[in-house]
């Protein structure tokens, strides 16, 4: 399973909102977590195009302080840069991002270390 994290900016009607997107890809299926406005929201989707510039379609619901906002998003990744759009009942918002550094692996604990 391939896991990639992106630092993203969503250009909403209330202005730019920074967050993260964790994308997990296996075969033609994707899932992950979108973190915006201090809230974590799961999503699922599919790989529309594989290759050097993969294209994804995801769906989920943004959690906000006032409720949920269902969305569909389509985006492409080219040389570590994510670009696309997020569509809600309130309109389409630009979504951009860059690949974040991979988190350090936690060392496994052995029975002798416990």
Image: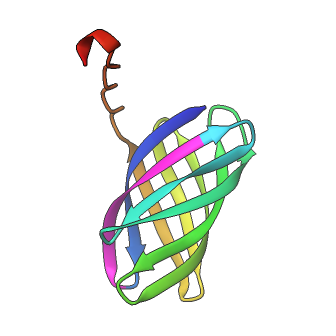
Main secondary structure of the magenta stretch: strand
Q: Is residue 95 left or right of residue 105?
A: right
For residue 40, say whether it is visible.
yes
Is residue 32 positioned above or below 13 on the image?
above
**Residue at figure coordinates x 46%, y 38% from the top left:** 80
| Image location of residue 8, percent across then percent down | 38, 56
Q: Quarter of the image holding residue 103? A: top left
| Image location of residue 18, percent across then percent down | 31, 63
Is residue 18 positioned above or below 2 on the image?
below
| Image location of residue 45, percent across then percent down | 68, 56
Q: Is residue 26 left or right of residue 66?
A: right
Q: Residue furthest top?
A: 112
For residue 57, say whether it is visible.
no
- For the record, the magenta segment spans 14-24
**Residue at figure coordinates x 45%, y 87% from the top left:** 67
Q: Quadrant of the N terminus?
A: top right
| Image location of residue 46, percent across then percent down | 72, 51
Q: Quadrant of the C terminus?
A: top left
Q: Quarter of the image holding residue 100? A: top left
């Amino acid at each position: 399973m391939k896991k990639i994290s992106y630092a993203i900016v969503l250009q909403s009607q209330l202005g730019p909102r920074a967050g993260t997107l964790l994308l997990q890809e296996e075969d033609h299926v994707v899932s992950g977590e979108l973190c915006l406005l201090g809230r974590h929201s799961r999503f699922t989707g599919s790989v529309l195009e594989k290759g050097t510039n993969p294209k994804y379609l995801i769906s989920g619901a943004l959690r906000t302080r006032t409720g949920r906002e269902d969305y569909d998003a389509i985006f492409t990744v080219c040389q570590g840069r994510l670009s696309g759009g997020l569509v809600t009942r309130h309109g389409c918002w630009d979504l951009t991002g860059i690949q974040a550094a991979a988190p350090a692996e936690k060392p496994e604990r052995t029975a002798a270390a416990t």
